[in-house]
Amino acid sequence: MFLEKIQVEGPYNFDLVLDRLAIDPLNQVDIESRSVKVPMLLDNTPVVAQVKAIGTTEAPEFIIEGTEGPLKEKAAKRLSEIFQWHLPLETIHQHFQNTELKPIFDEHYGTPIVLDFDPYGCILKCIIHQQLNLAFAHTLTERFVKTFGFEKDGAWFYPLPGKVAELTVEDLRQLQFSGRKAEYVIGIAKETALGNLNFEQLKNLSDDEIYDKLIKLRGVGPWTVQNFLMFGLGRPNLFPFADIGIQNALKKLFQLEAKPTLQEMENFSKSWNPYLSYASLYLWRSIE
């Protein structure tokens, strides 16, 4: 069995990463062993890596299992992208030490943004989760993946675009999708299968260019694009002003009588540039 040991720059709190990943029932997380199985589609080949933490927040170290073979280098690169191992979190932490978010950043020290395992799956999940409470959103996504996706080595893969493109609205309504949400998911799968939506190419575009491209898709609004940029591509400077969770977190942090106005949110967030995505993540953490 091939095992690879890697070290990354601290701080990096993998236990908080696992806590957040465990919210999604599709993620195969083992809190006790400090590990997670990561499904990746590399050159159209499904690869499952197990990432296990053996280090500490200050001295992070991991054992990677299951990436042997010709796709080893691509798997290593993709894992680094997913877990954002290349990003020095201490720099970000220090940035917030002179801001109102200092207590939250101290409490959740070393929490990285971790990407969804697949950008195509990320945008489908964003569509499915729209206007649903979190519990049912996860239930609906799990039904979708386990009905039409596939499993390998204990990890679940989202259904391939070609398969989803051939589904009917009624196929998804049987899982309790709304008719419109079913149309959106099938439509995005068709655009992907046709090559009109290429996620590798999107990585090379600016945030604004990606926004202009995705917002044209049916069912994709600003919230969806912002979440995709943050959790699909790991862009560091996104602040979803319309997100109810962030509004509630700011209300709690600043002890406001009502949810903050757009102007108040803009004023609060000025000093958080260029790491607005991390401000968003830590604000969500503060009320989870």
Image: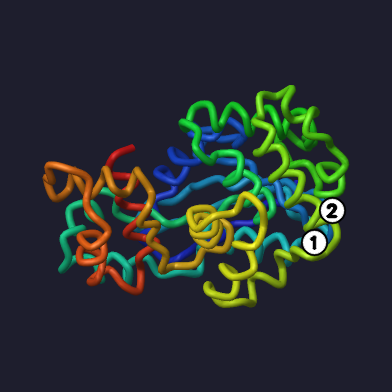
For image coordinates 56% across by 31% down, the residue present is: 138
Residue 50 picture location, percent across and down: 64, 45
Q: Quadrant of residue 164?
A: top right
User: Which callout, 1 or 2, points to the residue nearer the camera?
Assistant: 2
Q: Are marks 1 and 2 in contact (CB under 8 Å)?
A: yes
The answer to which of 193 and 54 lies nearer the viewer is 193
For marks 1 and 2, give the CA distance: 9 Å
Amino acid, disc 2? Thr
In terms of image quadrants, where is residue 217?
Answer: bottom right
Name the secondary structure under disc 2.
strand
Q: Is residue 211 above or below residue 4?
A: below
Q: Which residue has dot 2 on it?
A: 45
Q: Residue sitting at 77 percent across and 28 percent down?
A: 147
The quarter of the image holding the C terminus is top left
Q: Decide: few, some or many residues near mark 2? Use Cα within 10 Å; few <14, some 14-19, many ≥20.
A: few
Label 1: few (<14), some or many (≥20) within 10 Å? few
Q: Is residue 42 left or right of residue 276?
A: right
Residue 157 percent location from the top left of the image: 74, 41
Tag 1: residue type?
Leu
Q: Residue at x 70, y 24 (%)?
A: 175
The residue under label 1 is: 71
Where 187 sits versus 59, above or below?
above
Q: Position of residue 183 (x, y in %)?
A: 72, 41
SS under mark 1 = loop
Q: Residue drawn 52% across and 63% down? A: 234
Q: Which mark is residue 106?
A: none
Mark 1 vs 2, N-terminal side: 2
On the picture, is 287 further left or further right than 29?
A: left
